[in-house]
Structure formats: C-alpha cells, structure tokens
Amino acid sequence: MTVKSNPVCLSSRKDAERVVELFDNFLLDCDGVIWLSETLIEGVADFLRYLQLHKKNIAFVTNNSSKSRQSYVEKFRFLGIHGIEKEQIYTTGYSAVLELRKMGIHPGSKIWVLGDSGIEDELADEGYIALGGSNPLLDQPWNPKNPLLKVDPEVKAVIAGSTNDFNFMRITTTLQYLVYDNKKIPYIGTNGDRNYPGPDGLTLPAGGSIVEYMSYCSNRPYIDVGKPSKTFADVIFYDTNFDRSKSIMIGDTLSSDIKFGNDADLGNGHGTMLVLSGVTTINELEQLISPGSSSSHLHKAQGQDQALIPQFFVDSLTKFYNLLQS
Ligand SMILES: [Mg+2]
C-alpha cells in the first residue's frame, strides 16, 4: 500500500460539501456512528435526510450478527428514522448466509449455529434450517447425555457469532461439529471483533471473542465474513452494484471500518472517514499517525498501520451535518 497522507479533519462547510460531492455511495457503520446502544446520536436523522435529498445511495454495514436485517429496519423506525429498507442493511448474519450460497450450500440444508437469533432469522429467511442457536436444550447445565451432543451428519456448515448465552453446552456441541469428519464442515465466523462499548462505560466481549474461542479449541481457522474482510466487501458491492471509486465507508473503528474501506479500495484509496462518536479517541488516531508521540501534530504512519488511516475524520455525524448547514 502506498503511504497515505494525514487524515483531513472536517472543519468547514467547504470540507463537508466536498465529501458529499466526491461520493455517490455512503456506507455507514451503525454502533458508534448512528447510535450508541439504544440511543440515536443527535442529528443523524437530519444527516441521512440530507444524503437522501442529494440523491446519495446509503447502505448500513454492521459486524453485529445478533439482530436480523428486519430487526434493524424496526430499530431505525423505533428511533424515528423512517424509510430505511431491509435491502440497505448488511449484517454479518446475512453475509454468512450469502457465503453459504457462494460455497454451493443450498437452501434447505441444515446449518449449526452458535450465536443469537439474528443468524437463525437470516438463515430461515433464505430457506436454510438452523440447528443449535437458541434451542432451550442448550441452556441446560453440562450433561454429556444431552442429545444435541450427537452430530447430525446432514449439517453442512457451522456459523458462529456473538451471543449472550455462551455456555459450556453451546461450546461442546459446537466443538463436536467443528472436529467432525476431520474438520470437513466449513466454519464461518461473523467477525473478528474483540470487544465493543456497552452501557455505563462497560467493555463487552464482541463476536470475534466467541469465534476465536471456538477456533482455538477446535484448532482450525474460520472464514471471516465481517469487516474488514474482503469477503464482506465483495458481497456488498456485488449486491448493490455500487461503484467502489465513488463509495466511502464511515465508521468509528479503525481496525474494522477504516481497514475495510482501505482494503476494498473505496474512493480509489481515499474513501474512508472516521467518526469520533464511538470507540476511537482522537488520542488513538494521533498515536497511529505518530507512534510513541504524545504531541498533537499528526505525522505519517508506518508499515501495516497504513490500512488503518482514514482519509477524513470528524467528531460525529452531528458535526458533519452542522458543518453542511453552517
Ligand atoms: Mg461501530
């Protein structure tokens, strides 16, 4: 990768308008960008309306697999944002289903799930049969006689993602499928994220912690279908037909959102924007650009960190919208 220039801080109406002019397609992360948990970030509804008025395409790209696309439509509506269609939403549960299709695993096949209902709902939506997942037999204490420990030989793939119900029964049942038949059943992980910000300042384990846990105990890698993987980008751009050179990814996480946009070559390598309304602080951005320095001057980053450097950054979408209105 070529050495990237320092990120541009949006600080004037001219800066903000330039970004809107440069891109036709806006890919937006949700947690930390649109909302914080169940609270809409102020001004986001106005910002989305502004993009719609200017005939921009909008897609939401989230590593969260716990909710289905339909649940996201309902969440947007509940938070007062209307007119968002299911087809504009890309969750990693949906990405996992598209990956099954790409592998030639047809609807009607049985898929073992370790994760919340979002994955089961997406599978059902596309005609797959989800096993495991929210089955109440998996909520029971450890019992080696639990019938779900016996592998169903018709299972064609395993999908793992985030869940609040990660217990020993779920671990051991999933492990049986991962090691079955010399580990031949494909193992799909919804993302590699370590943690995410929860309510009251808590740090919560993200899907990647569960996916990696199962990877460790089965001693096999997984197919990553979340950000920043190329697999997820390919699925989205195939599905939307968006021109990558006219697309920008806006997100709050350097290692998933910004790396995703840079690795997918959005905006010819210039289609990324970091918002500081989520997990990344301005200090972290400065450290990336100028490792080991506490100075506020931004300098060029080295080596592999290049893919983490955004083209633009701004406090929040609130600030972005206010600049457009200033
Ligand atoms: Mg986020």
Image (cartoon, grey):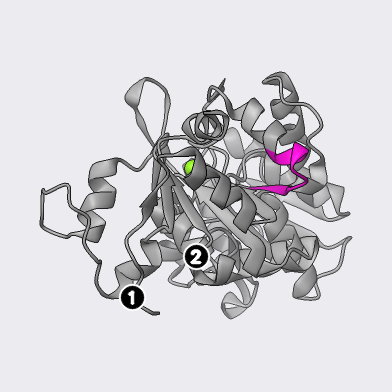
Number of labelled discs?
A: 2
Mark closer to the chain start, 1 or 2: 1
Side of 90 relative to 197 (left or right)? right
- The kind of residue tagged 1 is Val
| Mark 1, secondary structure of its residue | loop
Say which residue appears at 52% left-offset and 27% top-offset.
Answer: 37
Which span is picked out in magenta?
51-60
- The kind of residue tagged 2 is His
Mark 2 is surrounded, within 10 Å at the Cα level, by few (under 14), some (14 to 19) or many (20 or more) other residues, namely many
Say which residue appears at 61% left-offset and 58% top-offset.
Answer: 22
Side of 10 relative to 248 (left or right)? left
Q: Front-most of 229 and 283?
A: 283
x and y, in percent, of residue 241 in the image: 79, 65
x and y, in percent, of residue 38 in the image: 56, 22
Q: Is residue 158 above or below residue 196?
A: below
Q: Is residue 301 above or below residue 22?
A: below
x and y, in percent, of residue 144 in the image: 54, 48
Q: Is residue 265 above or below residue 212?
A: below
Separation of disc 1 and disc 2 at Cα?
12 Å
Q: Front-most of 186 and 199?
A: 199
Question: Dots 1 and 2: beta carbons under 8 Å?
Answer: no
Q: Front-most of 181 and 270?
A: 270
Q: Where residue 270 is drawn, which disc sits there?
A: 2
Is 295 one of the magenta-colored residues?
Answer: no
Q: Where residue 3 is drawn, which disc sits there?
A: 1
